[in-house]
Amino acid sequence: MSRSPASSAGRALRAVGAWLEERTGLGAQVGAVATHAVPRNTASWWYVFGSASLVVFVLQVVTGICLATVYTPSANDAWTSLVQLDTEVPLGWFLRALHGWGSNFMVALVLVHMVQVFLFGAFKYPRELTWTVGVFLLLMTLGMAFTGQVLRFDQDAYWGLGIGASIAGRMPLVGSRVVHMLLGGPIIAGATLSRFFALHVFVIPGALLALVGLHLLLVLRLGINEWPMPGRLVDRVTYRQRYEEQVHADGVRFFPDAAQRDVVFAGIVILALVACAAVFGPIGPGGQPDPAIIDTVPAPDFFFLWIYSLFALLPPSVETPLILIGPVVAIGLLFALPFLSGTGEKSWRRRPFAVITVVLLALTMGTLTYLGTFAPWSPVMEAWSALPTPAPYLEDRSPLQIQGALIVQAKQCRNCHALGGEGGRRGPALDSVATRLTRDQLIRQVLQGGGNMPAYGKNLSPSEVTALVAFLETLHPPGQVPARNASATPVGN
Amino acid sequence: MADPRRPNGAVPPVSRRGFLLTLGVTLSSVAAALFAIPVVGFLFSPVRRLARQAWIPLGSLADFPEGETRLAVYRNPFVQPWDGETANVPCWVRRIAGDSFQVFAINCAHLGCPVRWFPESGLFMCPCHGGVYYADGSRASGPPPRGLFEYQHKVERGQLWVRGGELPTLSEPV
């Protein structure tokens, strides 16, 4: 009797499988782990973010290794090797795009995973250590994002390092030593890039792999957090027994019953990542890292924009203590959370303070990130020479007033003050300044500054001040009277 | 439990296995410590205070007109071949009159971004968080906690020299 080639190939494969299984025994172990019972209510779309983070992490390792075969971690060559990856190496641009967008995806997924775990009370007994390891994983993910931005060795990377060093330099006593440790010397140079390369490809990924393993081990050992039921409190004495009973009475196999959603979501995430990489392309590199090119406006990557905003908006008097103590307190609170609130109510429906904390943090960081995208506190460096004075502001003006309009441009006033909606937003827009300040107040403000405005007394001649103020006095909406000095014309006169 | 071979209940001598284990742990601990010393020393070597500043010529006096502020670039005196462009260090040179100079670091005193000079308004402006300084480097507005960092400088043999080689920060303002 003849056998079909397909079935004989199948038999051969099974034979190889049986041979391997007899020696390794891995199949039985993996099978047992994959099909272990979990509470039925964890088969939910809310439980997919951890596995998706893991999938993206594996992809980052793959694309990272690919990039490392071309990338040159030398300050002299790094930027050029990135440009070559983008333009000459076949598919280099796409691998860079996958790695860059993968970084964004991973930070986002880790954050969403953490919020879900927090709201579902999954950090409570007996999963305190799982949370603690997770906080380390979050910090390392952010560490990878920052060191990765440094390896994209462009102007933003160079000045980002300068910002990091300036923050470290604010530490009392040890400041300069920490700066030297961070930079690998007294100044940003080749040694700086080399040590960030070592951090990004050896130190942090190694620690990440080990801690991801521990994190998974803990999840398997302690069981996936059951869907929290309002009023069902966590008690150290009864919790584990009740969990076992629930799994026994109403459990499903992790694979495929619970994990099928993870598989679907992972597929969606990978497709979205590939789409982002294909559509938006690689992130940078920006301008070459030559510090002598000072016409640059450094800004951090998306997930660090909120910190950038915070630095601009904190009052200078409290800035140093807040920069140095704030992160310690914030990270300390994250670590302390399961030990401060390790038992009791798990459901977010009965934890209003937890929900409000998440909402407030999301609003705060969202607002700061939004502000960071256009940085209203920064002077617009080219506004004075690039933006025209709005034509309506020049109509029916006297020669002196037009001279004043010229001074607004020439003296860089528009770098901080907008006219007609264009210009800097550091100071107030000047479109209706005449309704707020009288002539005398305008002169005083221009000459002496104040309220965050530099004094222009030394850089304006008296005739320039006269012309400038004559123009500013015309800036009020039609039909709205200019500000006047009430004491100069008392009532009854 | 009494050892039948030692009926008098004497203290049992250290067994060979116990001795080897103690010896092994002690030896390995000493070896690990000896191994760790150079590793830790290597990792922390950048912290050691070396003479990392040197006098560098910025250019002849004729390059700096009196009453003006000009950008100058010097090469880091402790450059390595693989430092590339990062060894270019820019600074602002203000020639007040004659041999009277001020040389400002490019780095904003707030968080180190490169400040730009605007001669028309006589201001340095920072693109990052909006720090502004007057022509003499003093703080005008914004978040910087102090004025611009100033390099030590001297005029010698018709050249302007600065003492550089270190990133200025609040704890080491050049």
Image (spheres, grey):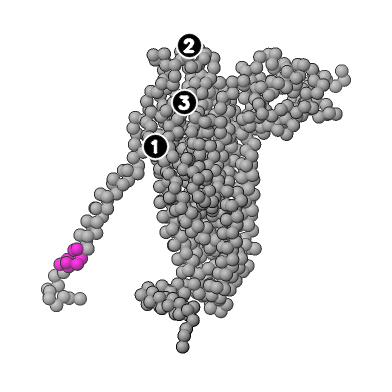
Q: Which circle, 1 or 3, is nearer the viewer?
A: 1
Image location (x, y in percent) of residue A221: 46, 69
Q: Which circle, 1 or 2, is nearer the viewer?
A: 1
Question: What span is colored magenta in the figure?
Answer: B13-20
Image location (x, y in percent) of residue A480: 83, 29
SS at badge 2? loop
Is residue A363 visible in the rendered structure shown here? yes
Mark 1 sits on what residue?
Answer: B82
Chain holding disc 3:
B
Mark 2 sits on what residue?
Answer: B98
User: Circle 1: is it few (<14), some (14-19), or many (20+) Cα within 10 Å?
Assistant: some
Residues at marks 1 and 3, CA–CA distance in whole angstroms: 19 Å
Magenta stretch holds residue A153: no
Residue A314 placement, left or right of A194:
right
Residues at marks 1 and 2, CA–CA distance in whole angstroms: 38 Å
Compare marks 1 and 2 and give the one earlier in the sequence.
1
Compare marks 2 and 3 and give the one earlier in the sequence.
3
User: Circle 2: is it few (<14), some (14-19), or many (20+) Cα within 10 Å?
Assistant: few
Q: Which circle marks residue B73 in the picture?
A: 3
Residue A156 placement, left or right of A438:
left
Chain holding disc 2:
B
Residue kind at label 3, given as amino acid type: Val
Residue kind at label 2, given as amino acid type: Gly
The picture quadrant where one finds residue B10 is bottom left
Image location (x, y in percent) of residue B64: 49, 16
Q: Residue furthest right?
A: A492
